[in-house]
Image: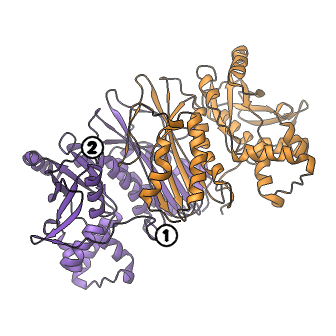
Chain colours: A orange, B purple
Amino acid sequence: MALGEFQLIDRYFRPLQQPGGLSRPDVLLGVGDDGAVLRVPAGRDLVAVLDTLVEGRHFLPGCDPRSIGHRALAVNLSDLAAMGATPAWALLGLTLPAADDTFLHALAAGLAELAARHGVALVGGDTTAGPLALTVQAMGFVPPGQALRRSGAAAGELLFVSGTPGDAAAGLLLERGTAGGLHVTPEQQHAARYLQDRFLFPTPRVALGEALRGLASACIDVSDGLAQDAGKLAHDSGCGLRLELDQLPLSPQLLALVGAGRACQLALTGGDDYELCFSVPAGSLAELSAVATATDCRLTCIGVLEAQPGLRLWQEGSPVQQPAAGFDHFAGAD
Amino acid sequence: MALGEFQLIDRYFRPLQQPGGLSRPDVLLGVGDDGAVLRVPAGRDLVAVLDTLVEGRHFLPGCDPRSIGHRALAVNLSDLAAMGATPAWALLGLTLPAADDTFLHALAAGLAELAARHGVALVGGDTTAGPLALTVQAMGFVPPGQALRRSGAAAGELLFVSGTPGDAAAGLLLERGTAGGLHVTPEQQHAARYLQDRFLFPTPRVALGEALRGLASACIDVSDGLAQDAGKLAHDSGCGLRLELDQLPLSPQLLALVGAGRACQLALTGGDDYELCFSVPAGSLAELSAVATATDCRLTCIGVLEAQPGLRLWQEGSPVQQPAAGFDHFAGAD
């Protein structure tokens, strides 16, 4: 069924203005005009992020459209979380080859569920015909001077990561079917489903990001692989980093499916985790422990910031070789 | 030459943080972290817009990349202008098949020139591999309650349009070469070039939009064809509209190339004009005349809002047939 652009907007995206059926009083004018009119709360700075998902690059052709809608917003909420921002509003640029009713219904539902969970109102956007891609721009608030940056870490501080990185990368391999080279026995079906869900429906660490304001000295979200993103945090802070591979928090599901060696590699270089990686002074460990409890997030110390630049991997008390480079969207495009 | 994503951002887009070399003090943190940190001025509301340009849909394959960069920002500044907003910041989602140095240099230059003209800082974005497309999200400010909406017009008010609609549509036909069916004689080359430039480098009516705050009762930008967009303004205001075709401001270049009949059709249904269409009470004509002078914009009264719903075209004192439907991105996608 084909729908005109204006019907599309009306049917699927206008309802997303009210997350979970609730209107945000800071949205003075939402979808349906040339622009949205929004009011940033007094005494708050605005944090703005934007991320694009392209079919064949960030999700597989034939992927569950609920996952596409979820992930398009999740990757942006993850960026807001990495800044310590409280999410508020989003705009959606949707390019799709045909206006298919079933597909759009599921895509909008995936986006709406996550938006409602975080009280995010969809306040505008654009739909156009073209190869399937979604660009979401999201906005949130931080108290002045409290945004988390990549550049605030200092030598001697501890590096933490949330959750269990590597799961999403394994999930993607499984989504790809035999191409991933993973053989799944009947007993492993449950673990495999878990890993696929970590790829298809990642959890942006919004509450954690907010709780880290005033506590973490630097923060980044893990989208391109833990080694690369942790390395960026260290580099932008003018530090180096010693990562303890033995400390990587690997999920039992990941270990069951791929074994310790490959699990470690996937955790370091896999990408798509949308966990937070952050530094804290050693004196803040008690406070951080309370944050882990309050936000129900597993937080694991995986290394230490050092004065000497560069990334150094350690395992069983000895330095080991560098892992392969992280995920760079153009690394292979010669 | 292939570039990594981070080098891309550094080389071409980081310099766009400072429009014309000037930094904006309201950008507390720009390109290079997970998000930008921005400060909306006290006593101002935020206006947010987002528009996508897709190759083959909004610009032709092989199009001058300077034009692509210009238009990606211009269509968003036009939306801000239609809201009466003063532009401030933009984010860019750039999807491109390969990281070509020459192409990116020209694209960034087209975007940078227009950004500098309006003091707009590029504060973030995302680059990814995929079919060529640009999504720009732009933000601006309005005094509380002064955003121009589509829905404020009243019966009896006059409808105006800026500039000379139809030029861009003719320019696109010319860009398409013989496919447009336009034959250009040597004497018409100059006019043809003018029309092509109106398509390739549209002028967002930013100063006009700002000047219309408190003066226009409703406003929309003309992107999908004057008849359709004017019709939306009337509809959203709960009015109908009588359009006087004799009053359409047709450029001498357009008339020279296509004649009066086709010029009128292009002006009504062509799209891509990025002019402003707005309503004012008859008592505001003197003030509007001063605005036209101050902003150096040709402003033409083309009709009157009426109580009876619907769009009525009049020519030489008589009603004439409806034009073809305006431009809808999915109208033909059965």
Q: Is residue B245 visible?
A: no
Q: Earlier in the sequence, mark 1 or mark 2?
A: 2
* Residue B148 - label: 2
Question: Residue beneath label 1, please?
Answer: B333
Characterize the local packing of mark 1: few (<14), some (14-19) or many (20 or more) Cα atoms within 10 angstroms: some
Q: Is residue B280 left or right of residue B180?
A: left
Percent from the top left, x then y, of residue A166? 78, 42
Residue drawn 55% across and 40% down? Answer: B32
Amino acid of disc 1: Ala
In the image shown, does A87 or B111 lie closer to the viewer? A87
Amino acid of disc 2: Leu
Q: Is residue B79 visible?
A: yes
Q: Chain of mark 2?
A: B
Image quarter (top left, top right, bottom left or bottom right) of the N terminus of chain B: bottom right
Residue drawn 68% across and 20% down? Answer: A294
Q: Is residue A193 left or right of residue B17?
A: right
Residue extending farthest front? B308
Q: Quadrant of residue B43?
A: top left
Circle 2 sits in a helix, a strand or a loop, which is it? loop
* Residue B43 - label: none
Percent from the top left, x then y, of residue B286? 7, 47
